[in-house]
Amino acid sequence: MKYSFLTIIAVFFMSCSDNNSDEQVDYTTQNETEIKAYIAENKLDAKRTDTGLYYVINEQGTGKQATAISNVTVSYKGYFLDKKGFSQSTDAGITVNLQSMIKGWTEGIPFFKEGGSGILLVPAHLAYGSGDISKNIPAGAVLIYEIKLTAVVDNSTANDAEIVKYIADNQLNAVKTNSGLYYVIDNQGTGKQPISTSNVIVAYKGYFTNKSVFDQSTTLGISIGLQDVIKGWTEGIPYFKEGGSGKLLVPSSLGYGDYAYNGIPGGSVLIFDINLISVN
């Protein structure tokens, strides 16, 4: 697999049904007028963000607060300005990653904590733009969602338990850092020691805790800048010197997070056998 596989994801993903990139008509002014009229008519205490999203907090919630990349469980009812419904979850809600949703959800859900509820009033440019036939959403439609944030799914505890079990099962002498990274030094190495901004040549094999390999370099390694890779590498590689080898056991928070990426399921623990060939 190429070097880009390890690089940090630099863009937020949108729903495959989001047609904003194809939008030919600018509905922003029209939507703003429509949303303001709806708010006035229904006497809502709504706040506006810089993007044009409006939201109403009926209940803030008291649990964890979502972020734009969180896995969340949300129950919702979606309808148009005329209150005609187009989508509704069960009471149990749906579990989704906010990176994969329309921008109105990616931005709006993080205003709530677990147990929170309220309304998102989403203009077309933060939703489906020129429309989505499969969802019966017309071009330029403002979407309104009544939402309740049931849970913010945190993988950190589960990831740590998974890593600890792997270490025990394989009798590894691993060290845990404050970030949650674990590393094993088989050979410290005797050459230069990199820092988090170094360019290095590293040979590696990446696999899951079930030992299924997802990526592997040649024995010649790859040349990378440690500022341009997942956090587990940025932190972990500098524990070795040139000629050093060992393992990095990387929780999802230091890997690819909660979003499925390039064959790696969201929330995955990643293990890397690494050999630090040189520090450039």
Image (spheres, rainbow, N blue to C red):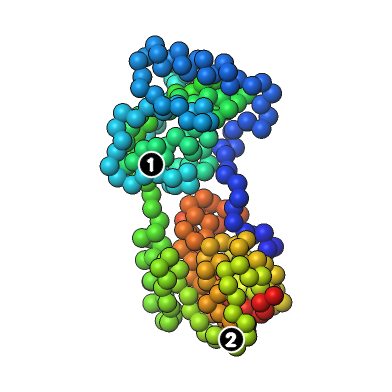
Give the image location of residue 242, x and y in percent: 63, 82
Residue under numbered circle 2: 189
Amino acid carrying label 2: it is Gly
Q: Secondary structure at mark 2?
A: loop
State which mark lies toward you, 1 or 2.
2
Q: Tell me the residue at 52%/71% (across/down).
A: 236
Give the image location of residue 275, x and y in percent: 61, 79
Residue 6 in which image quadrant: bottom right
Q: Tell me the residue at 53%/24% (across/down).
A: 123
Q: Is residue 234 above or below residue 169?
A: above
Amino acid carrying label 1: it is Thr
Is 192 positioned to the left or the right of 249 in the image?
right
Q: Quadrant of the N terminus?
A: bottom right
Is 257 positioned to the left or the right of 274 in the image?
left
Local packing at callout 2 (Cα closer than 10 Å; few below 14, some 14-19, many 20+) is some
Is 235 positioned to the left or the right of 115 in the image?
right
Q: Tell me the residue at 49%/66% (across/down).
A: 250
**In the rendered structure, are the residues bearing label 1 and label 2 in contact, judged by CB atoms less than 8 Å apart?**
no
Q: Which mark is residue 73?
A: 1
Give the image location of residue 67, x and y in percent: 44, 45
Q: Which mark is residue 109?
A: none
Foreground residue among 93 and 222:
222
Q: Is residue 166 above or below residue 64?
A: below
Q: Secondary structure at mark 1?
A: strand
Residue 91 shows up from this direction: no
Foreground residue among 97 and 253:
253
User: Which residue is outermost to the bottom?
Assistant: 190
Q: Quadrant of the C terminus?
A: bottom right
Local packing at callout 1 (Cα closer than 10 Å; few below 14, some 14-19, many 20+) is some
